[in-house]
Image (spheres, helix red, strand yellow):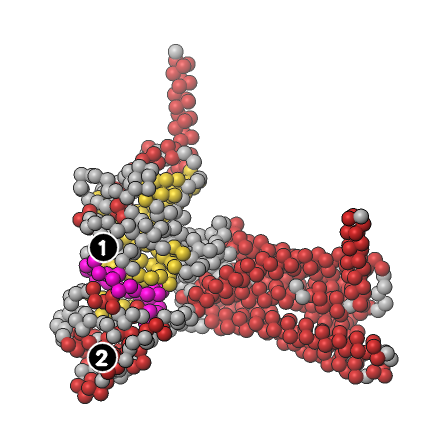
Amino acid sequence: MLFYLFVLYFVNHLAGTQKCTSFSTYIAQQTEKNTTNINTEDFKVLDLINVKNFSELDAKCIQNKDLLPNVINFVPYESFILDQSHMIDFPQILNKNSFSFLRIERINAFDLNNTLLKSFDLFNSINLEFYNSKLKILRNGYDICQIIETNNLFKNMASILFSYSVKYIAQTCPYIFSFLNINVLQFQGLSDTFLKKNILGFTQNSNFSNVFSVESSTLYVFKYRISNKLIDCNIFNNTYLNINGLIDFIEADAFKKIRLKSLEIETDRFLSLFLDGGKWLISFKENDKIFIRFDGNYFFPNKDICFFKYIPQNIFISVPNRILSQECTCSMLVFFSSYLNIIPKKISFLWNTYNKLKLIGCTNQSFYNSCNLKEKLDNCEGFVNFYKTQNNEILYISLIVDFIGLILNQIVSSLGITFNILNLFILFAENKTKNLTTDSSVLMKRLMIANSFINLAFFLINFFHIINRCVQINGIFCSKIYQTLLAQYYNIYMIEFIGSIMKIWSSITLLCISITRLNLLSSNFAFKIRYFNLEFFISIFILSIIVNLDKIFIIVVNNDKYFSESEFSKEFPMKNTFLLNFQSPRNGYKVIYQNKQSIVFYAMNIINFLINDVIFYILFTIIDISLIKTLNRQIKQKRVLKRKISDFESLQIKVRFIIFLNGSVLFTLRTIHCCINTWLFFARLKSNFDGKNVCFLYPKMCTNYQEFSEFFFLLSNIFNIFLFYNLDNNFKSMTRERINIFFRSKKINKG
């Protein structure tokens, strides 16, 4: 009997131990911190990754309540529906007395019968965040949008965030937020473009605003149309609403059925808010607070007066005071008409704007009369439509460039792998014939083989670079492992470090081939090929490693996949960490190297740029011009060549082809590659004190352009097979021979 009880106890204990496996590492780490007196005021983060069995997550596993985490990152093994059958007692696992975060991934749908959102009423501050999920709402497993009856008691929730990786639908049931006192409700990643269609809309229900309680809401949009389908009259009623991002258009009835405590719009395209003349502002009342924030300077030129035609004369709009530093314009009189008709009280926040308008002469009656506002506004018909087609955002262009470059990169890499394998196959076959008569011929064959090997490896590395590519999260293409450590390390060490080294080797070997070819053609050429010895190539090898060491240090792995900034301000890994001002931190970036250390990396960055994008470009141009001049000179010296007319004409055609190929195609590709990298080089080194460093503001944008410039380098390298074919008679004859053998074997097989 005792033996039986002992076995039963042992089995239960073992089951309990296995049940708490997900917590064992966390408990051990936190216990060690407590025993070694390590500062425990930081967030305690519990990572529950690849959880297969939800029942394993038992709050009893953490018996010491002092060890309760502030942050839980929950990533199940596979996607699931958050319903009653997937209940996890997160409130018992989290520390309710601190500022706490619960991050959940891989939710396929939210069922209204799940009470997770209403389980944190006793928490001081709980922030619930969702990633890599779908905001699809069900009711008891069915696609039905009906409110679930409750005791009508509202539960507290500090913040709910739907991140950039959440997929939205156009008909979202709003009752997921019913009976919740939400301080902050955020929706990120709204977009309506070819590259990313992520449209959020809410089902139009009768007036149920009494079941919603949202203090403030933020919508992060990119090239998005604001309509009443998004601005739900129930959820957003009586809230502080913030719309942040690039807005394409605001529909006239977007705010018609809603009353807001305030509206704040932060955008890079000020005029896009008024494409219809500002009709959407008619829905607001006199005391409503409207704030418009934007970067850059805009001073209301008179030519833009039609953009503000329908702005009501009793609506006060607050804008940055810096734009009221120039002389008053007629457009200002229309935009700020309310300030001139109804003088705000001195104690109000609008008084400062009124004072600015007064200082720049907007209250001057004679200036007002000179504008002839009625006549100008009457002539506005058909004007607005002209401006709807303006779409020159450098950021969006970078995304299009990235998508096109991604496709072309795979095509060119595949061709590069095929062509370089063919090069090696022919060159090794040619070596067996032993038809090489001079040292220059032997050297050129070796250089061609080395160049083909290097390019083959380079194209193979770039072929798998697709694992690092992400046009936009939840967009037209984004690698599933884009944010993983494996993909980031591949980017740093294989693409950036080894890839950059191979770029130098590829350029060096191709340059040596050109010099050797020139040496064969011209006895007057000053450069002697004896300099191409072992010591020379070892020196190049060491130099190529040294000038690329900076990439290992300044390209940083990004472990922050849970971010709330703009999706263009984060990249994986972080490449654009280099600023001229070494001590200026980037948002979320740590300054690792300062003073003398940063100067070393600054110098290495300059040397790398000069070698890859300036010196090689100049040398290739000089050699190409010299080669063309030498060949043209030999054509003219018909007596020296001692060839027949037909041979001479054939040589002339060949030279013209080489001139066109080298001088036009390759020169153009190298020029584009050099120009893009030159612009990026200076853009990255620019100080950000004036807020104009685009690589600081949008790191991913600069990376997109850099990736596109590398495509032109790849494209120039696939032409090597055509250069070898036209510059080397043995290579040409062997190629033709192999092609003939291939087609003869095909005929035999068919026969």
* Observer-nearest of 253 and 271: 253
Q: Which residue is mark 1?
A: 233
Q: Residue furthest top?
A: 1
Left or right: 447 in relation to 551: right
Q: Secondary structure at mark 2?
A: helix
Find out whether the residues at labels 2 and 1 contact each other: C-beta distance under 8 Å: no
Indicate which label's residue lies in the foreground, 2 or 1: 1
Mark 2 burial class by Cα count in 10 Å: few <14, some 14-19, many 20+ = many
Check residue 267 for magenta coloring.
Answer: yes
Q: Secondary structure at mark 1?
A: loop
Quadrant of the frame with the N terminus: top left
Rounded to the nearest whole Å, what is the CA distance between mark 2 and mark 1?
32 Å
Provide the residue span drawn in magenta: 246-272
Query: Is residue 167 visible in the rendered structure shown here?
Result: yes
| Residue at figure coordinates x 38%, y 35% from the top left | 54
- Residue holding disc 2: 333
Where in the figure is residue 141, as x and y percent of width and height? 33, 37
Residue drawn at x 57%, y 70% is: 673
On whether residue 372 falls in the magenta region, the answer is no
Residue at the image position 26 percent from the left and 40 percent from the top: 119
Q: Position of residue 168 (x, y in %)?
A: 36, 51
**Crowdedness near tag 1: few (<14), some (14–19) or many (≥20) residues, C-alpha within 10 Å:** many
Residue closest to the eye, 395 or 439: 395
Q: Can see residue 589?
A: no
Residue type, mark 1 in image = Cys
Task: Work out whether 327 lies above or below 562.
Answer: below
Three-letter code, disc 2: Leu
